[in-house]
Amino acid sequence: MEPIREPIRVAVVFGPGRQIKPVWFEWRRRKHAIQQTTYTWTDQVGDDTRLHFSVSDGEALFELVYSTASQHWTLLNLQID
């Protein structure tokens, strides 16, 4: 995976039980529709709980991270097949 670490805009759907499902994100003025979420996990950095989403737009695999402390999204990594 290639490290990116850039802020992004993300549209999400909130489900029952605090579920968050990203549906699309914008990166470098391009909108990526999420076709599949392949894996999710959380980690802790100090007081910040971060939610990680491994998602695909059908062309590439992206790692999106949501910081619960700052309430910002970051595109952390990118893998192009």
Image (tube, rainbow, N blue to C red):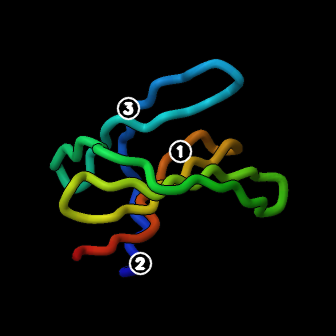
Quarter-of-image position of residue 19: top right
Percent of width and height locating residue 15: 57, 21
Percent of width and height locating residue 12: 44, 30
Q: What amino acid type should be assigned to the residue bearing mark 2? A: Pro
**Secondary element at tag 3:** strand
Q: What amino acid type should be assigned to the residue bearing mark 1? A: His
**Secondary element at tag 2:** strand
- Asked if the residue under mark 3 is in contact with the one under mark 1, i.e. CB atoms within 8 Å, the reply is no
Left or right: 78 in relation to 27: right
**Residue 73 or residue 64, whichever sits in front:** 64
N-terminal label among 1 and 3: 3
Quarter-of-image position of residue 33: top left
The residue located at (70%, 44%) in the rendering is: 69
The residue located at (26%, 45%) in the rendering is: 26
Viewer-side label of 2, 1:
2
The residue located at (43%, 38%) in the rendering is: 22
